[in-house]
Amino acid sequence: MKFKLQFKDKEYEIEISETEQGETKIKVNKKEFIFEGEKPKEKSLSSVKSFPKKDFSEKAITAPISGVISEIFVKERAQVKKGEKLILLSAMKMENEIVSDYDGKIKEILVKKNQKVKSGETLLIIK
């Protein structure tokens, strides 16, 4: 089983599997942990509530620094390629091009032209 977990602004890639010897192996990013012992029984897990699955195919593009949105080069539902210009951010008398880190489709644009943004603020979502 593989999944991603975000905790305190950090993203962790977690993989849980079983070794040939029946041990439980948990890999967090690139560090592995091996656990020996009895597997949990099915009925002991029945009291655990399931949480809704998060769609990790969505990626947030955030402002690297505080500034003002000068230009938005894309529209919602537009296909974009990695490296494509998305937004022009003006800060400290400099123009900063925000480019896509991913191939995908613009799901939502969360800012408008001339809007002030803070460092780390989500500008748009790519799916």
Image (cartoon, rainbow, N blue to C red):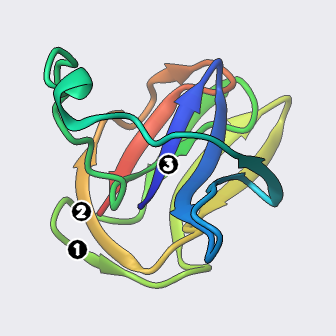
**Residue with the mark numbered 1:** 78
Mark 2 residue crowding within 10 angstroms, few (<14) / some (14–19) / many (20+): some
Amino acid tagged 1: Ala
**Residue with the mark numbered 3:** 4
Which residue corresponds to the image point at 51% horizontal and 73% vertical from the top-left?
102
**Residue with the mark numbered 2:** 75
Secondary structure found at label 3: strand
Mark 1 residue crowding within 10 angstroms, few (<14) / some (14–19) / many (20+): few
Can you give x and y, in whole percent of width and height, for residue 91 in the image?
Answer: 76, 32
Report the Cα–Cα distance between label 3 and label 1: 26 Å
Can you give x and y, in whole percent of width and height, for residue 96 in the image?
Answer: 74, 51
Quick one: 105 or 19, which is closer to the camera? 19
N-terminal of the two: label 3 or label 1? 3
Q: Is residue 2 left or right of residue 43?
A: right
Q: Are marks 2 and 3 in contact (CB under 8 Å)?
A: no
Can you give x and y, in whole percent of width and height, for residue 72 in the image?
Answer: 41, 54
Amino acid tagged 2: Lys
Which residue corresponds to the image point at 59% horizontal and 23% vertical from the top-left?
7
Please, which residue is most extreme toward the bottom here? 81
Which residue corresponds to the image point at 47% horizontal and 33% vertical from the top-left?
122
Is 2 rendered above or below residue 114? Answer: below
Secondary structure found at label 1: loop
N-terminal of the two: label 2 or label 3? 3
